[in-house]
Every structure is written in C-alpha cells, then in structure tokens.
Image (cartoon, rainbow, N blue to C red):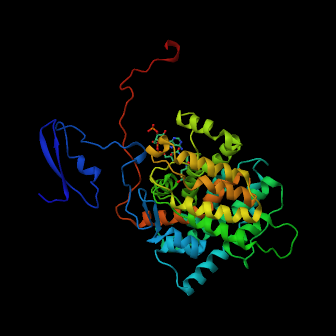
C-alpha cells in the first residue's frame, strides 16, 4: 500500500477503499465509488463555505495563515510593498514573473492608453441617484462594460483575454473616480497619461481648477502600497465568485461585476467601512473595554479582526499600520488611529481573541488611511476593488485555461419535502 494514500472503511457494506493523496489532498470524487447499496448515488463530501476544500490549483498567491506569510508568485508582500509599484505587481500577478524594462514599458503603455471610458458610460453613471453607494455603481457599471466590448465574450481567444485584461485594469480607476465625482456633484476629470497609475487616480478624484495636477508623493506612495497589498488574496469570496461565474464562460466584465458584488459585503471588502463606523461609535479609548465585552458576548463583531485563513497577524495589516502612521504625519493625527491601536492592544491580550487566534486583518487600519486621504467611507470598498481587479483577472485567466476546470456546480444535501400533492388555492 503506497504511503501517500488513505485507507477508508465504509462500515455500511463493510468495504475498504484506498484513496490516493496528492499534494496533501484527496479528491472528493474518489468517495463517490463508496455506496451503501448498488443503487446508492455514492458518498459525497459536505463542506459548507468551503472551509476545507481546495477548488483549484493555483500558482498566483501563496498564504501561510498560521505563520502570517503572503506571497505573490513567490515574492513576499513586504518586498513588493517596499520596492514595487502597483502596475509592476499587477504584471507579476498576471504573468508570473517580474517584468523586464521593456515589458514594463509596454505594459504601462497598454494600461495607460485604455483608461478612457466611452462617453455613454458617463450618462450611465449620471443615471444613479446623487447618494448612490459608489460600490453599487461600480458593480453596475463594470458589468455594463460588457455591452461596450462584445468581443469580450470570446474568452477562449488569448488575444481577447489580453485586451479585456488591459481594459479592466485601466478603466477601473476611471470608473471609480467618475462614481466618486458623481456623488459630489463635481465634473468628471479625464485621465492624464503623463501621471502614474496611482497619481492619475488621485488626479481624477481631486483635481479642481489647476491646469497641471501634481499628486503629493507621500499620498501617491500610500495608494501604491495599499493597491499592492490588495492586489490578490488567493481563493477569497470575490475570487471564488470570479472563478465560479467565469466558469460558465461568461465575459470577464460580467464576472468582474459578480466579484465586485461579493466584495461589497461587510464580511469581505465592506469590513473597512464597518471598522470606521465601529471606531467612531466607540469614540473614546475609555469605552473600549465595554465594546470588547459586547463583541465577546456575540453582540456584534470586532470588525477588522479575524480571518478565515490567517490565524496570526495578517502581514498586510502590519504594513498598513506603518503606512497609516506615515500618512497621518502628513495629514494630521486622526483620533481614530489612537482608538484602533488601543483596541488592538486590549484585544490581543484578551483570552477570547487569543484562544480563537483573532488578529487584525487588512481592513483594521486601511480605513483610517483612506479617511486621512479624504475619502468618504462609501469609497472604501471601491478602493479595494480597483487593485483587486488584477487578482480577479489572474484567477480568471488561470481558470479559463485549466483543463481540470468545468462549470462550477456544487452538490447539495436535500432537506425539503418530496412528492407532495398540489392543492388548488381555494382548498389550502
Ligand atoms: N469578533 C468577535 N468574534 C469573532 C470575530 C470578530 N471579528 N471573528 C471571529 N470571531 C469568533 C466567532 O464568533 C467564532 O467564535 P465561536 O467559536 O465561539 O463561535 C470564532 O471566532 C470563529 O469565527 P468564524 O466566524 O467561524 O470564522 P470565519 O473563518 O467563518 O470568519 C471572518 C472569518 C473574517 C468572516 C470573521 O473573522 C469576521 O467576521 N471578522 C470581522 C469582519 C472582517 O474583519 N472581515 C474582513 C476579512 S479580511 C478582508 C478580506 O479578505 O476580505
């Protein structure tokens, strides 16, 4: 019997099976052969919320949640945050290697020259109410892009995939800035091709009357770092949505809209918005113990704490905490940072959080930076969605060419009624 196998005895018929183990994993389909009787469907595995199920093989992002390691294509996140730019990191995530000088120039050119939006998209944005949540607007408008680029449906054509990749990464900041300015009642600012990806985003958000907008280098660097940290995070809820929706061979704009919708939720990309609400509600360091007590008794959650994969300090949170201090040195101290740091200190000494291995995640400090940069809380998940587009696309591109992948279609354990007799409405 090979070592890398699992011997399973099904006590119902008393039969023994040998299941191969590959990469520390058994295949759920290998259990189907185990039947209680000849006409039995076969054994299934049950894993709501995929807590112990690998849904794909991936070379994009590595996480060791116990140690607190995050690597894109093998490069530690700390090195990329320190030395790379968002566009270079996006290239790395998508193509698997750091670009050489010429590759980076071409890539930057291709992204820069696809930043414009069709003028009709502006009208589309204008159709939203003045107080529409910008993330809801992003979900709608990014999905609408599929109607502007019908060629995107040729997902098996590598050239088409490449073109849609450029377009999506290039247009997300423009869409986000248009949604933001719509909410503010400000005229839209068109992309400036002389600026960097992060610098141009700031230009489209904040430019007023000046003819020559020059982004503050500290803020431009902070956006770059935040974008790098949010670029991918393996099989999280939105990446899973991108892959699952994309597996039906829909176009990448529609799949990105689904991924963005997943990111909108308060347990995923919406958490940093919730963190600010929570810190504001706490309002004073003195009230922290009272709130911690509430979280422990299940009355609400300590937002920005805990993670499905990290059972240690999220490495992104460490970098963000440093960046928050740099940004706040420039923009002025935000009392919420002091509350957050004290809250972290108290929680990390509390048995409830320690025993459950609940540490600050990426969202705990990111909202404080976004607020210091001048963003309203509704923009926070949008600021997550822009850089995550590279990750979604990398996951989608991997899925499209993976011969093992098929349309995602889980099984269920049916718990409802069977075979009822229809009763006419007058007799119910
Ligand atoms: N505050 C208080 N208790 C918590 C928290 C929290 N933030 N997170 C988990 N717990 C408790 C939970 O009640 C449970 O306790 P018990 O075993 O007594 O029932 C235990 O810890 C395990 O929690 P879980 O809900 O089974 O863990 P999960 O892996 O399903 O959830 C999570 C992960 C991130 C959804 C959750 O930790 C959470 O809701 N955190 C707050 C929201 C948040 O910060 N989300 C951002 C995630 S990171 C960004 C991203 O990747 O999108």
The answer to which of 29 and 270 lies nearer the viewer is 270
In the rendered image, residue 177, in percent from the top left (x then y), is placed at 73, 62
Mark yes or no: residue 115 visible. no
Residue 204 falls left or right of residue 22: right
Query: Residue lying farthest top?
Result: 427
Q: Is residue 147 above or below residue 216?
A: above
Image quarter hosting the N terminus: bottom left
Residue 218 falls left or right of residue 86: right
Q: Quadrant of residue 347?
A: top right
Residue at image position (58%, 64%) is 319
Q: Is residue 243 above or below residue 81?
A: above
The answer to which of 158 and 177 lies nearer the viewer is 177
Residue at image position (61%, 47%) is 343
Q: Quadrant of residue 372?
A: bottom right
In the rendered image, residue 93, in percent from the top left (x then y), is placed at 50, 70
Query: Residue lying farthest right?
Result: 209
In the rendered image, residue 72, in percent from the top left (x then y), is placed at 48, 68
Mark yes or no: residue 26 visible. yes
The answer to which of 223 and 175 lies nearer the viewer is 223
In the rendered image, residue 249, in percent from the top left (x then y), is placed at 47, 59
């Amino acid at each position: 019997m090979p070592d890398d196998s699992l011997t399973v005895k099904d006590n119902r018929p008393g039969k023994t099976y040998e299941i191969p183990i590959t990469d520390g994993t058994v295949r759920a389909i290998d259990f189907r052969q185990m039947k209680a009787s000849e006409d039995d469907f076969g054994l299934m595995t049950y894993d709501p919320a995929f807590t112990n199920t690998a849904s794909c093989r991936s070379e994009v992002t590595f996480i060791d949640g116990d140690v607190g390691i995050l690597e894109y294509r093998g490069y530690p996140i700390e090195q990329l945050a320190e030395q790379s730019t968002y566009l270079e990191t996006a290239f790395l995530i998508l193509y698997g290697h750091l670009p050489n000088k010429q590759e980076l120039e071409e890539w930057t050119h291709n992204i820069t020259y696809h930043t414009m939006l069709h003028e009709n998209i502006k009208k589309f944005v204008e159709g939203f109410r003045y107080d529409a949540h910008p993330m809801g607007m992003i979900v709608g408008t990014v999905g609408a892009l599929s109607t502007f680029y019908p060629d995107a449906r040729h997902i098996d054509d590598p050239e088409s995939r490449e073109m849609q990749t450029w377009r999506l990464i290039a247009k997300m900041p423009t869409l986000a800035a248009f949604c933001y300015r719509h909410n503010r009642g400000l005229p839209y600012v068109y992309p400036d091709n002389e600026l960097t990806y992060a610098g141009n985003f700031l230009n489209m958000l904040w430019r007023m009357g000046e003819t020559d907008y020059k982004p503050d280098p500290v803020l431009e660097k902070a956006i770059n770092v935040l974008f790098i940290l949010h670029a991918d995070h393996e099989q999280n809820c939105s990446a899973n949505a991108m892959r699952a929706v994309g597996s039906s061979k829909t176009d990448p704009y529609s799949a990105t809209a689904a991924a963005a919708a997943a990111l909108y939720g308060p347990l995923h990309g919406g958490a940093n918005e919730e963190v600010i609400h929570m810190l504001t509600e706490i309002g004073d360091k003195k009230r922290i113990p009272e709130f911690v007590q509430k979280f422990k008794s299940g009355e609400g959650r300590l937002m920005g704490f805990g993670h499905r994969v990290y059972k240690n300090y999220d490495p992104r949170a460490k970098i963000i905490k440093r960046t928050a201090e740099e940004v706040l040195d420039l923009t002025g101290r935000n009392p919420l940072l002091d509350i957050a740091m004290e809250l972290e200190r108290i929680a990390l000494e509390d048995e409830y959080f320690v025993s459950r291995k609940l540490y600050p995640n990426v969202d705990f400090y990111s909202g404080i930076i976004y607020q210091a940069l001048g963003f309203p809380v509704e923009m926070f998940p949008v600021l997550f969605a822009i850089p995550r587009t590279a990750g979604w696309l990398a996951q989608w591109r991997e899925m499209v060419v993976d011969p093992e992948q098929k349309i995602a279609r889980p099984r269920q354990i049916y718990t409802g009624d069977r075979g009822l007799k229809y009763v006419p409405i007058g007799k119910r």
